[in-house]
Image: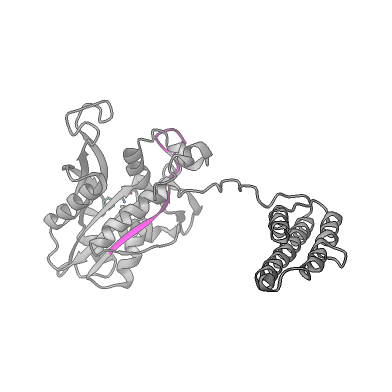
Amino acid sequence: MITERIDQLMAEVQDLKATTEQEVEALRIKYLSKKGLLNDLMADFRNVAADQKKEVGMKINALKTLATERINSLRENLQACSEVGGNIDLTRTPYPVRLGSRHPLTIVKNEIVDIFSRLGFTLAEGPEVEDDWHVYGSMNFADDHPARDMQDTFFVEAHPAVVLRSHTSSVQARVMERTQPPIRVICPGRVYRNEAISARAHCFFHQVEGLYVAEKVSFTDLKQVLILFAQEMFGPETRIRLRPSYFPFTEPSAEMDISCFLCGGKGCGFCKHTGWVEILGCGMVDPAVLESNGIDSGKYHGYAFGMGVERITNLKYQVSDLRLFSENDQRFLDEFQGAN
Ligand code: PHE
C-alpha cells in the first residue's frame, strides 16, 4: 500500500544523518532527485483510486517538505561546523558558565553605602593622591602630629607635601570647602598607611566616612544613626557601646563597639571574652575643622564617623587574614559567590 510506504519513508527521513557533504548529497539524490524515491512515489500515485488521491497527495507533499528541510538542515549544520573549523557537535550540552562574584570588600562597602543612603546620605568621592592640607591641615592635625610622619604616611612629594591619603576625612574637607550646610555625605574609598604587611595590618585598606553638618546637630543624632547602622548591618539584636577616645578632628570623640554577634555578648573567643567588638571611630566635628573649611561654627554643628571596610568584612564573614583581600586567590573569592 502506498500510504504505508509513505509512512515508512517519513520515519526514515526523520532520522537522516550525515557527517560529510558527500553524504548529504547522496541523501539528496536518494530521496529528491529525478530518480529518487519521491519521484518513484509519484509514479505509483497515478494508480491511486480517485477518491483517495487528495489524501495521499497531501501525505506525499508533507513527506517532500520534510525531506527537503531535513537535508537542507544537515547541509547547513555541516557548513557551520566547517566555518568554525572542525567537527563540532552542535547538539552537545554546553559547559556550565563560570560566574564571577563581587569582591567581598565591594559587597560590604555597597551594603554600608546602601544603609546610609536610606538614611539620606549622599555619596562623595575624592582623590587618593592628596595635598597635606586636605588630609591633615584642614582636619586640625598639629604640624608635628605623628600621623604626618614618614612612619604612617606615604609621601609622593615632600615640599609642599603631596601624600597618599591616610584616611577618607580628606573627602569631608573637600565637600565642606565647596558646600554650605546642610551637608550629609558618605565617603567610601581606599586609603594608604605605611605599615608592614601582616595578617592584621596592610599598607592600603578601605574606609567609609560619614559627615553630617547642619544647625542643631547633637551627639544624640550621631548615636541614633549609629545604632540604626549597627542593627541593619549586624542584625536587630545588636547593641552598641561608645567609649571616649581622641581624634584631632572631632571633639568629643568616641570609639564604637557592637555586642559580639557570635555569642550575643556573653563572651567568646571571637570577642576575646569581652562580649564587645570595636567597629568604628566617631565624634562631633571640632569647631576648628568647620572654620578651616569655611563653615560658621557658631551657627552649625556636625558629627562624623569613620570605619574600616576590611574590619567590618572580617567581622561579617570571619576573615582572619587581611592579606586575603588583595591576593586574588580564586578559592577565597569563590566563597562569596551568591552574596550580592
Ligand atoms: N579618620 C579616622 C581614621 O582614619 C576615622 C574617623 C572619622 C574618626 C570620622 C572619627 C570621625 O581613623
**Residue closest to the eye, 186 or 147:** 186
Question: Which quadrant of the structure image shows residue 314?
Answer: top left
* Residue at the image point whose x is 21% and y is 26% from the top: 273
**Residue 81 in the figure: left or right of residue 270:** right
Magenta residues, start to end: 185-201
Q: How many marks?
A: 0
Residue 154 against residue 323 in the figure, above or below: below
Residue 194 belongs to the span the image colors magenta: yes
* Residue at the image point whose x is 35% and y is 44% from the top: 146
**Residue closest to the eye, 2 or 295:** 2
Residue 197 belongs to the span the image colors magenta: yes
> x, y percentage for residue 224?
15, 54
**Quadrant containing the N terminus in the rendered view:** bottom right
> x, y percentage for residue 76?
75, 62
**Residue 110 in the figure: left or right of residue 7:** left
Colouring scheme applied when the structure was drawn = one colour
* Residue at the image point whose x is 25% and y is 27% from the top: 272
Whether residue 303 appears in this view of the structure is yes
> x, y percentage for residue 252?
17, 51
Question: Which quadrant of the structure image shows residue 69?
Answer: bottom right
**Residue closest to the eye, 322 or 170:** 322
Whether residue 252 appears in this view of the structure is no
**Residue 8 in the figure: left or right of residue 141:** right
> x, y percentage for residue 229?
23, 51
Residue 293 against residue 228 in the figure, above or below: below
